[in-house]
Image: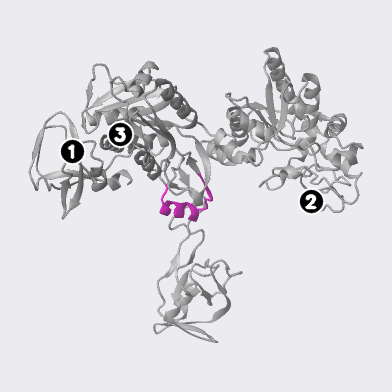
Amino acid sequence: MVDWSGGNDTGPRPRKDAIWLCEAGGDPEYLRNRQAAEARLAALLAEARDAGERVLIGFDFPFGYPAGFAEALTGRADPFALWDWFEAALEDSPRGNNRFALADRINARFPGTGPFWFNGGNADLPHLPRRDTRAGHGMAEHRAAEAGIKGVFSTWQMGGAGAVGGQVMTGLPVLNRLRRRFGAAVWPFEPEALAEAPAVFVEIWPGLINRAVKAAETAGGIRDAHQVRLLARALATLPQEVLEGMLAVSAPEEGAILGAGQEAALERAARLQPPPLQNDCFALPPGVDWTPVDEALALLRDRLRPVTGIETGDLFEAEGRILAEDLQARRANPPHPNSAVDGYGFAHAAALAAAEEGAVHLPLHPGRAAAGAPFQGVLPEGAALRVLTGADLPAGVDTVVLEEDCAVDAAGLAFRGPPKRGANTRKAGEDMQAGVRILAAGQVLRPPDLALAAATGHGDLPLRARLRVAVLSTGDEVVDPGAEAGPGVIYDANRPMLLSLLRRWGHAPLDLGRIPDDRAALSAAFDRAREEADVLLTSGGASAGDEDHVSALLRAAGAMTEWRIALKPGRPLALGLWQGLPVFGLPGNPVAAFVCTLIFARPALSLLAGAGWQAPLGREVPAGFAKRKKPGRREYLRARLRDGRAEVFPSEGSGRVSGLSWAEGLVELDDGAREICEGDPVRFLPFSEFGL
């Protein structure tokens, strides 16, 4: 990717408003002038040619002008006729070029004034105005490709902030020479040549990934350098079908901007993506067999990291999403001093001077200040002004008195006091100053968070892509709920339960259905999950029996660890990677699957999604039951609170699904032996602590 410049040599030190180049995966290169840039591009193209590689190069200036210009200047509606014309007419060196004189020369051939404007040279030019006083030249201001794109500049503007006119005139001759020398195809003018050409030139515009660039700028550096680096990354990592869709554009005369209309895809591709998990992330330490719950949780917390990418999302659709980056206030809240009440504003010093025997009399100035309709002008010294709640305080007002405390007639108003200076007003930024952090990365966005982001100027937000979690059930004995069930067959209770949990937690579930006890079918389902999801949850087949195919398949792939966790219910938990895809093999019994999902999968999924590790907070309550517990395993009992006490489900069987619906939480009993009598304190974990 190349960020171009139409100016003079910028010297040996890297600076903005110069030429920058970056190859995907490399560091941005500073090029001090166009001659250096043309030599560097020629070397890059020659190197790619000699290596048998094809290269796509993007340039951040238009390849064409609005329709009709090429024919008016050259007699042919052919963009390459324009390229030839500019190559022949441009005089360019590191010390300067004749771009302004060239624009003046072209304007002389058009009626009226224009189409080019902004003479940035020292000498006056008869046909190139310094300001935009154009009229009657007959050319459109923008190309069709620029319609609806916020912030693009016209090709007619030769100088000033953001102008591209000079870049086009100085850039097209360079492209024309490189095109002839290396046989490059130019998009979108030569669509039939794109598939075979050794090089392809495309027009880019960094404004399409402005959010990613602004985020990179917070760490310092030069904006132009960030732009070429991030655009190179984006186009190099886009899926092939997305890039092909971007290239499927017809604009035979004016040209087009690659990726216009698909900014979201470019933004996602431009942002840094987390690396895949290490193949040994689930491996247990040497010699470990039975794993205590706390150690298992610590291992997961230490070894997992976010796997979701970053995208830009509409604030109005961001509830429940995960904020990907720290968010700073774009402006202060409130942005200006304003009134907290309906009343009358004045200068406090003037009120003090007008006070007699505890009363203040002030003349009332005509007009008023209202929210969204500020008073225009400066309030005369010693006068008062009608102000309404939320109105910006005009110059000359620092205090407001309530209208209920005033007497008003045609001559003015009177009130007791005066009140303290600044009474009934809000200071600018008293809630939040511009630039301060308002929300931290990893925050799961709630309605109050969205209100804060909106109040400080944000319309869209950097968000983590939703974690895609595939779910499947295994076993020949399992059928879908509602299906006909013969002898030895059970209904699949786990899949609807797990899919519902994932939706509650804000993830994107993918239902892979039921897989029979068939190794090939299970392998195919795993492959689909790897293509379409970030994580896979399975239920059943996680132990070491003859039909436990989840464990066997992961073990055969060389990336499976069976964690025998000191836990009741639950114990076997198969953890592994399927070609980089994290797999959580849950027990088949619904109660065990539910408990393992809450205790292990929920915090792990939260961390993988980018929201950090989420541990439940319990509270001590009196036991409404008696129990003798053996040492060695942590136990989770289905429980609910009644009259302030925790009562537990009568059966501890892991197949008793009714206990899950009956319960409102879990009672957690520590690993050691314990004898519990009614009234003893126990730790209760309400389901609300698990996001339910």
The amino acid at mark 2 is Arg
Residue 276 visible to an observer of this rendering: no
In this rendering, the label closer to the viewer, 2 or 1: 1
The residue beneath circle 1 is 652
Q: At x 21% / y 31%, what residue is drawn? A: 567
Q: Residue 600: give its label.
A: 3
The residue beneath circle 2 is 131
Where disc 3 sits, the SS reads helix
Horizontal side, residue 277 vs residue 618: left or right: right
Q: Is residue 459 magenta?
A: yes
Part of the protein shown in magenta: 445-461
Q: Looking at the image, which residue sits at the far front? A: 486
Badge 2: few (under 14), some or many (20 or more) residues near its Cα, within 10 Å? Answer: few
Q: At x 49% / y 56%, what residue is drawn? A: 455
Q: Quadrant of the N terminus?
A: top right
Q: Nearer the viewer, residue 67 or 419?
A: 67
In the displayed structure, 656 sits above or below 336; it is: above
Horizontal side, residue 187 vs residue 359: left or right: right
